Image (cartoon, rainbow, N blue to C red):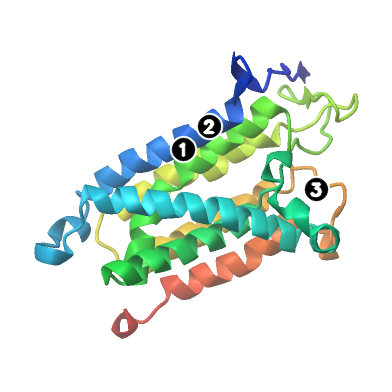
Amino acid sequence: MLIHPNIDPVALQLGPLAIHWYGLTYLVAFGLFLLLGLRRLHHQPFALVQGPGAWKKSDVEDILFLGVLGVVLGGRMGYVLFYKPVYYFSHPIEILAVWQGGMSFHGGLLGVMVAMWWFARSRHKPWLLVADFVAPCVPTGLAAGRIGNFINGELWGRVSDPSLPWAMVFQGAGPAPRHPSQLYQFLLEGLLLFVLLWLYARKPRRLGRVSGVFLIAYGALRFLAEFFREPDDFLGLLALGLSMGQWLCLPMMALGVLLYRLPRHNT
């Protein structure tokens, strides 16, 4: 079995200023989104729009700015409401203490959806068209975030068979070898999802289908990865032996199916 390398979470120290690896992975995620968003401008139907409604580089930049706000605000509020509502309602000032950790992907997704609605409304574009534009640009950012989790030695996996060649001992998780679930999620929700969704989105699709495929595929891959990830110690496993992450994936996949099956005349 392997030993987690216990990488220093601080990548660079400049006097009192500390630059953390996790912060750098966020910068990588935002940079990749901008790069992929500019590539999306060459895909149909975005490349076909002409005149005042044409998609521009500034649109990608504005979507990124609003998306960052959605990720941070939605991610934090999702963690508060989905994972520790009783605690934070008793300590409301700590909701602002984001530096102490505590973000929810599913909350961040809701925050991004609201941000994309705001962008679509302000630019007089169909909300689903904006969502279809954004969806293929998201998985690389998720991959970067999982690398940050691995560097920090957090969100480790469940105890595994010691004979597993890549089983890993994490500091703070006891002496038992565990699944490096951060890397599983990096490969599944990050790289694999990106390849599948990018290839699917390169061709014209009915409005809402790219977003629907993202929700279905991410939900399914995250649901699978959660079987190898240690559930939060303050929650444990919930009904039917599923984790909170798995339960949150179910309505996500259901929404994806609805978007994928939207009748043509409603789009």
Is any atom of residue 93 visible in this view? Answer: yes
Across and down, in percent, residue 150 comes to: 66, 29
Q: Residue furthest bottom?
A: 265
Is any atom of residue 220 visible in this view? Answer: no
Of marks 3 and 1, the one in the foreground: 1
Across and down, in percent, residue 126 comes to: 31, 72
Q: Residue at x 39, y 49 (%)?
A: 64
Q: In this rendering, would 165 be left or right of 24?
A: right
Q: For the residue labelled by badge 1, is the local secondary structure a helix, a strand or a loop?
A: helix
Q: In this rendering, would 142 be left or right of 205?
A: right
The amino acid type, in three-letter code, at marker 2 is Thr
Q: Residue at x 85, y 63 (%)?
A: 86
Q: Which mark is residue 25?
A: 2
Among the two numbered marks 2 and 3 on one chain, the one whose residue lies closer to the N terminus: 2
Of marks 2 and 3, the one in the foreground: 2
Check disc 1 and report the residue beneath it.
29
171 over 246 or under it: above or below: above
Q: Residue 32: name its quadrant.
A: top left
Q: Residue at x 56, y 32 (%)?
A: 23
The amino acid type, in three-letter code, at marker 3 is Pro
Is residue 180 or residue 56 the one in the foreground? Answer: 56
Q: For the residue labelled by badge 2, is the local secondary structure a helix, a strand or a loop?
A: helix
Task: Calculate the distance from the C-alpha at mark 2 to the C-alpha at mark 3.
Answer: 23 Å
Q: In this rendering, would 76 be left or right of 265?
A: right
Check disc 3 and report the residue beneath it.
231
Give the class, few, some or many, for how many residues have Cα within 10 Å of label 3's Cα (few <14, many ≥20): many
Q: Residue at x 78, y 59 (%)?
A: 92
Q: For the residue labelled by badge 3, is the local secondary structure a helix, a strand or a loop?
A: loop
76 over 173 or under it: above or below: below
Q: In this rendering, would 22 be left or right of 136?
A: right
Quadrant into which the C terminus falls: bottom left
Question: Could you tell me if the residues under marks 2 and 3 are in contact, i.e. CB atoms within 8 Å?
Answer: no
